[in-house]
Image (cartoon, rainbow, N blue to C red):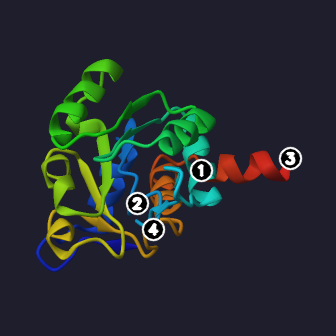
Amino acid sequence: MKAGNKKNKITPRELKKRAKGVRVLILDVDGVLTDGGIILDGDDNEYKKFNVRDGHGIKLLQIMGVEVAIITGRHSRVVEKRARELGIKEVYQRCLNKKEAYERILSNLGVTGSEAAYMGDDIIDIPVLRRVALPMAVADAHEDAKKYALYITRAKGGSGAAREAAELILKAKGVWNDVINSYIEV
């Protein structure tokens, strides 16, 4: 667990308190749920590689009552499909002003910024990182985005960063052992 950076120090106790209060985790896509690479073929097809452990972490959060939402600057049918597979209903694409989508998510879900976490990787994410209780950045995020994060993952984007955030939240809520036990008891 890497809490913040030199400028944004946070104690493990404060990190746990903030994570415990999270009712919605909002995620960027390119550079967070993917490694940021985009493959385009000659037929206008777009390909993205998602990490299945990230997806499993998202499902675990949902099972334990934490909503998950997506805000991304690009538009992609691949993102629509992945969100549908994961049961993510709050999906905002082609958002160059992520703050507006963030406010819509809070309103739609009936939560406040003090109950929200956000994970981003670039400067377009700064307006939302500044507004949530638990701002997070992936390990390979842009340095200016990291300045606004209180938690920086060990994992890079597309390589388990969202799963790391999910486990942080579930452990802070004291339900991680319930998750593990649900698999042991099967």
Mark yes or no: residue 149 visible. Answer: no
The image quadrant where one finds the C terminus is top right
Tell me the mark number nearer the camera, choosing from 4 and 3.
4
Query: At 40% from the left edge and 52% from the top edge, which residue is drawn?
Result: 29
State the CA–CA distance, disc 4 to disc 2.
7 Å
**Which residue is identified by label 2?**
32
Type of amino acid at the residue the image marks with label 2? Val
Tell me the mark number nearer the camera, choosing from 4 and 1.
4
How crowded is the residue under tag 4: few (<14 C-alpha within 10 Å), some, or many (20+)? some
State the CA–CA distance, disc 1 to disc 2.
12 Å
**Which residue is identified by label 1?**
55
Which numbered circle lies on residue 69? none
Helix, strand or loop status at disc 2: loop
Helix, strand or loop status at disc 4: loop
- Residue found at the far front of this picture: 42
Name the foreground residue: 48 vs 59. 48
Mark sitting earlier along the chain (4/1): 4
State the CA–CA distance, disc 3 to disc 1.
22 Å
- Residue found at the far bottom of this picture: 6
How crowded is the residue under tag 3: few (<14 C-alpha within 10 Å), some, or many (20+)? few
**Which residue is identified by label 3?**
185
Is there a contact, CB below 8 Å, between mark 3 and mark 1? no
Mark yes or no: residue 172 visible. Answer: yes
Mark sitting earlier along the chain (2/3): 2
